[in-house]
Structures are given as C-alpha cells and as structure tokens.
Amino acid sequence: MELDYFKKKLKEEKERLEVELSQVAKRNPKNPSDWEPIPAEDGTDTRIPDANELSDAFEEFQNRSSVEVHLEEKVNEVIAALKRIEKGTFGICAACGEKIDEKRLEANPSSATCVKHSPR
C-alpha cells in the first residue's frame, strides 16, 4: 500500500473540509480543534422583534449548525486516519484487525473499518 499517496490525499481532503467549514463556522478560541457555527452574514439584526426576520435568522443558523456538525465529523475522521498512518495502523480494520481493501480506502481514505464492519 502506498502510504504517501493516502497521506497526501487525506491532507488535501482536510484542507478542503476546513475551507468549507470556515464558511459556516469558526474555530473555538479555547479549543482550536473544535468548530462553532456562525450566524449568516446577511445583516439581520436579531434584536429587532420582526418575527419573520428572526425566524429566518434562526432557520439559517440551524442549517449552518447541521452543516458544521457534518463537516467537523468528516475532518475528525480525516485527522484520525492521518494519525493511523503515523502509528502504522492505517488500512487495518479497527474492529477485526484485518486489512481494509485498498479499493475501499481509495473511495474513502478515512475508513477505519473494513466493509464488513462499516457502521454505514
């Protein structure tokens, strides 16, 4: 297995995900590995008691929160895969200890399990 290839692919994926995350979230200053959703930059003033505007602002924030959670999970999976490369356990199923098929890793380099033990 070509670890340098997968390491490069994972680093590129991490960068791409962080760019996407930065559009809907910001790093938590107290914990830089954590991301927090940010409100939309549409100029809506949540102090104005217009129910429709306020409702739209909350809906947009909920949408951003959902996207942030999904992207942060993906980034954490990529970071974990990079750590597995460093520890020498990349490509080994975390559930059964067997090799993960290289085709699976090609499709999803952050896979921690073989197809048989895939949670999805």
Image (spheres, grey):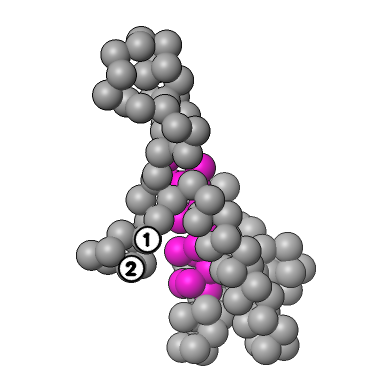
Residue interval drawn in magenta: 65-81
Q: Residue at x 50, y 56 (%)?
A: 22
Mark 1 secondary-structure assignment: strand
Q: Which mark is residue 10?
A: none
Q: Which mark is residue 32?
A: 2
Return the residue nearer the eye: 17 or 57.
57
Residue 15 point in image, percent of width and height? 59, 69
In reply to whether residue 116 is colored magenta, the answer given is no
Residue 60 point in image, percent of width and height? 47, 29
Q: Residue at x 49, y 47 (%)?
A: 24
Q: Are marks 1 and 2 in contact (CB under 8 Å)?
A: yes
Q: Residue at x 45, y 64 (%)?
A: 76
Q: Amino acid at mark 1?
A: Arg
In reply to whether residue 77 is colored magenta, the answer given is yes
| Residue that label 1 marks | 27
Give the total number of marks visible in the rendering: 2
Return the residue nearer the eye: 110 or 68.
68
Q: Residue at x 45, y 20 (%)?
A: 56
